[in-house]
Amino acid sequence: MMRAARRLLFLAVITFASSAVAAQTSAPAPSVDALQTVATGGGEASRAIVLHGSGAPIIVGTAGLNGLELYDLSGRRIGAVPAGEAVSLDVRYGVLASGNQPPATIVAAADASNYSMRFYAARGNSLTEVTARPLPLGFAVEGTCLYHSAQDGTLYAFAVGDGGEIDQYMLFATGDGRVDARLVRRLHVASTVEHCVVDDRNGQLYVSEQAVGIWRFTAEPETDVVPSLIDAARLGRITEEVAGLALYEGGDGAKWLIASNASGGQLYVYDRSKDDAYVGTVTIQSRGASISEPGGLYASGATSAGFPAGMLLVADDDATGGSNYKLVSFQKLAVALGISVGTPQPTVTTVSPVFPTVRAIVETVPVAKAGDAADDPAIWSNAENPAASLILGTDKQGGLHVYDLQGKSLQFVADGKMNNVDLRDGFKLGGQSVILVTASDRTNQAVAIYKLDTQAQRLINVADGKQPTGLSDPYGQCMYRDVRTAKYYVIVGDPDGTTKQWELIATRQGKVRIKLARTFKFASQAEGCAADDQTGTLYVAEEDRGLWKLAADPRRGSAMTSLDTVEKNAKIKDDLEGVGIYDLGNGRGYIVVSSQGNDSYAVYRREGDNAYLGSFAVVADPVTGIDGISETDGLEVTSRNLGPGLEHGAMVAQDGRNVLPVEHQNFKIVPWKAIADALGLEVRQ
Ligand code: CA
Ligand code: CA
Ligand code: CA
Ligand code: CA
Ligand code: CA
């Protein structure tokens, strides 16, 4: 096995190297004639864009200390806008609509005079600065690019820099129509990055690491980064340094990535429909002289006289007569390369979320432990004072948190690696009615048992000594109260599918111990579970397969009914994780399941045949700065009033990627009202 893998690697390297050699020894690349702008006023040209609106398109380019300059399509300068020392810019159309703000055309520019970002609103041929407040980046910025998410319409700006920085900001419109930004996350490469570009439709960020090559990353912050090296110096086709990047959008069969092979004086074209496979090489010339070192690039599908398939703009910092921009007809470039222009499309993103979206209104402080740590919540609703309700959340690397509804941690109990947690009220213990809390403790392979002191807002350990499960790894967990017998149970699953149910018994000394009631088994790992006390039903998510139900009363047997599977329902994707129940009363309501594999939540009818009703996703709120929820493990749902904004209950869910900015994992609170509105569901009155 080892030897075979090594041989494969060897073959792959040989193939890569020989194709690079072929590129260097083949016939000279075709050359394409270009028009050019006048020399920039600031003596520098790093990137230009095409601005199109009602009239003829114009060109806006960075001009160093002269800020941004505007040119018409004959290359004449028609205006300038102060932008500090402008080194890069990008544009998006139809963005930042909010409340009373109509969608706008927004230009973002990187200002190297104080290493900050600036924003402009474009109307006709004029740019008006709309930067809400200074946005210092804290590093030597070299480039910027915008990303208009097709997932949820959010506008992001990436700022890239001298030290390999790739910072992602979420942009939002302020009440007075200005543009502000919040840091979402930081990606890195090892050395200088001057250029980037984003494919909005596919959520792919391309960056050129000058001395290394072209990287591709996922642009959505609620996804894993997934780096791919598209081309490289030394091992690939890049001669020495790579510079500008542009995307041409012509629909099927005409989705191109164009990159400046700067040191080689060439442009490379790659096919985005074919995993960015290399397509061909061209050089650009103007008045008989080739561009010796093409810099920043921009491709536009906006058509005009002489540019029937739009244009490619190339920054030429070594032009005789001073730095300027070259205007290349994309039609001519495509003919030279023998590629299709398709149907040229101006860069407009249609927002097409896969699922209806909602937003969280509270997030808890991050858990103390790094990595996959936060896991499963429970909710105690305070009937007398709903706003003083409490959230419990496990840190599966070390304990159990008590949070208030503002997300503040009131207590951390470091008793072990608590995986899942649940609670039930009304448990008789030591002559009192208490709120009983149990958790699956992976450190001690035990059931951890507490009572929740709601006055002190603290958990008090009431286990009658260690309560061993006999499981190799107590994992999924939930509680059940039989409303007829008034018996309380805890159900805990092992990763091998073995699941045990114990009755919780109060001792005379005011402690609680467990007594085995039954054992049953799933074919594979099951974790999330929720018991419906009113109907006596236990719902369990078998991670790779689907949602099951069975009788919660151990005396009624363990025959299971499959409610949904990942094979049958394309809207859910494994792993299936947390399960919660929304109670509308009279046995009616909803079952909510975390569909971790596609970062969404599936909703089923509680009554009848448990029909699948739809799914929703939780996305970021740029105004509050609370990020979306993704890769959710545990969740809990309540229909009880949790106070202002949460009168109809809430979903509390673990967030596997706590960004905006990047911090340890946490839990987020989503009003049920928002979920009900998004999916057309009922709320408990
Ligand atoms: Ca996780
Ligand atoms: Ca739970
Ligand atoms: Ca799991
Ligand atoms: Ca998140
Ligand atoms: Ca956050």
Image: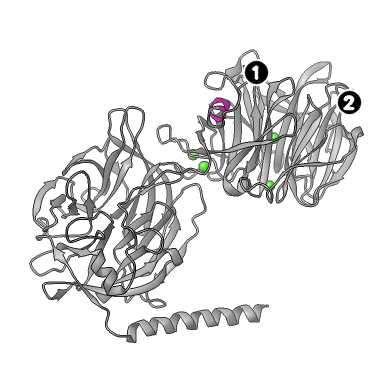
Choose top left, top right, bottom left or bottom right for residue 210.
Answer: bottom left
Bin the neighbour count of mark 2 within 10 Å (Cα to Cα): few under 14, some 14-19, many 20 and up: few
Q: Nearer the viewer, residue 344 or 194?
A: 344
Question: Amino acid type of disc 2?
Answer: Thr
Label 2 residue SS = loop
Q: In this view, does 657 lie above or below 312?
A: above
Q: How is the rendered protein coloured? A: one colour
Residue 639: image x %, image y %?
64, 23
Say left or right for 72 vs 247: left
Q: Name the residue under label 1.
A: 382
Q: Mark 2 points at which residue?
A: 507
Residue 650: image x %, image y %?
60, 27
Q: How many labels does the image show?
A: 2
Q: Is residue 458 above or below residue 515?
A: above
Q: In this view, does 80 lie above or below 514?
A: below
Q: Name the residue located 55 percent from the left edge and 33 percent from the top edge.
A: 364
Q: How far apart are marks 1 and 2 (CA)?
A: 27 Å
Q: Nearer the viewer, residue 137 or 410?
A: 137
Bounds of the magenta span? 672-676
Label 1 residue SS = loop
